[in-house]
């Protein structure tokens, strides 16, 4: 057995000391990758910009890079030509990039999101027509819980490449209610009644002091006035989670207030098309 090993070593292009040196380099590189990974985790843990998933991703990339460098050094020590080794590394890297570029892009976007913090867990956001509350941030996607009970995963790249609305930043959102007043109403008398009705809704009144919006006071706008009717819009602010309940309460409060003045009206949060169809149906 000893004679066979000696024969292989003598016939090979590297000697016994090359093998010993390659083993030493491999062991040192392995431990270096482990220590580097732990060091990166400890260092990044003190940086509040990155969460656990981002920290682990960076640490793994550092370790794999050191292991790849170690393998290249070992092959060079054993006499492998440097150019083929570099060519193989480039080819493998290119194939891996093409195969995993979508995943890598989302991981990179996840690092940016965790570092810059445009959104946080618990924020209510809307992107590309999808709205919901963030319940989880991962290295590849953002998990949203919608108001109708669905769970939607949005790739991290969508948050960086598309317009993002974070309703939790302002603390309030604006809604509208449309009203059609029949006859020839006295608007100077009606407008204060409408403002008082909107202000009486609890979910509307409570947002006035807790929002970063400069003004959350209700507003009334006149759109159309004819001898037969007048179309007006009432704008108001509410918390994002209470927006639907607030619209419903405002519709009811406005209808009751206008009815108390003796006016016949049609009130809706669905916009002017609904009002026109409703008036046509009544006529």
Image: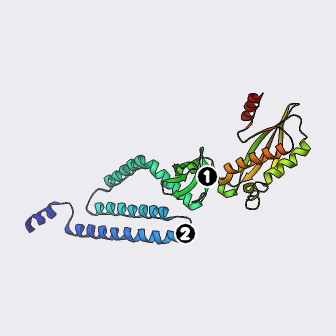
For label 1, the crowd category at 10 Å Cα-Cα, with few meaning under 14, some 14 to 19 and many 20 or more, is many
The residue that appears at 23% across and 67% down in the rendered structure is: 19
- The colour mode here is rainbow
For discs 1 and 2, the disc positioned in front in the rendered view: 1
Which mark is on residue 47?
2
Specify the quadrant of the image occupied by residue 28. bottom left
Q: Position of residue 98 (x, y in %)?
A: 42, 46
Q: Position of residue 30 (x, y in %)?
A: 33, 68
Helix, strand, or loop for circle 1? strand
For label 2, the crowd category at 10 Å Cα-Cα, with few meaning under 14, some 14 to 19 and many 20 or more, is few
| Residue that badge 1 annotates | 125
Location of the N terminus (image quadrant): bottom left
The residue that appears at 79% across and 40% down in the rendered structure is: 179
Location of the C terminus (image quadrant): top right
Distance, label 1 to label 2, CA atoms, is 26 Å
N-terminal label among 1 and 2: 2
Q: Position of residue 29 (x, y in %)?
A: 34, 68
Q: Position of residue 9 (x, y in %)?
A: 16, 64
**Cβ atoms at labels 1 and 2 below 8 Å apart:** no
Between 136 and 115, the one lying in front of the other is 136
The residue that appears at 73% across and 28% down in the rendered structure is: 281
Helix, strand, or loop for circle 2? loop
Between 69 and 80, the one lying in front of the other is 69
In the depicted structure, whether residue 33 falls above or below residue 281:
below
In the depicted structure, whether residue 42 falls above or below residue 176:
below
In the picture provided, is 24 more to the left or to the right than 245? left
The residue that appears at 72% across and 49% down in the rendered structure is: 249
Which mark is on residue 58?
none
């Amino acid at each position: 057995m000893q004679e066979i090993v000696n024969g292989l070593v003598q016939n090979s292009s590297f000697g016994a000391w090359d093998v010993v040196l390659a083993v030493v380099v491999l062991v040192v590189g392995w431990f270096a990758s482990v220590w580097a990974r732990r060091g990166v985790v400890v260092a990044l843990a003190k940086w509040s910009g990155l969460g656990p998933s981002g920290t682990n991703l960076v640490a793994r990339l550092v370790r794999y890079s050191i292991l790849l460098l170690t393998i290249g050094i070992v092959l060079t020590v054993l006499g492998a030509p440097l150019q083929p080794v570099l060519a193989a590394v480039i080819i493998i890297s290119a194939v891996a990039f093409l195969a995993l570029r979508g995943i890598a892009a989302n991981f990179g976007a996840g690092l940016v999101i965790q570092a810059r913090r445009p959104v946080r867990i618990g924020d209510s956001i809307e992107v590309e027509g999808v709205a919901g509350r963030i319940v989880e941030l991962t290295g590849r996607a953002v998990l949203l819980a919608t108001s109708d009970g669905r769970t939607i995963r949005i790739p991290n790249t969508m948050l960086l490449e598309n317009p993002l609305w974070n309703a939790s930043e302002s603390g309030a959102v604006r809604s509208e209610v449309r009203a059609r007043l029949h006859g020839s109403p006295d608007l100077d008398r009606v407008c204060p009644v409408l403002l008082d009705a909107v202000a009486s809704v609890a979910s509307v009144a409570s947002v006035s002091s807790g929002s970063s919006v400069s003004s959350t006071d209700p507003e009334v706008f006149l759109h159309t006035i004819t001898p037969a009717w007048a179309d007006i819009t009432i704008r108001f602010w509410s918390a994002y989670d209470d927006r639907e309940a607030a619209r419903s309460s405002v519709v009811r409060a406005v209808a009751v207030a206008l009815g108390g003045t003796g006016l016949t009206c049609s009130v809706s949060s669905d916009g002017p098309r609904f009002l026109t169809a409703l008036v046509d149906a009544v006529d």
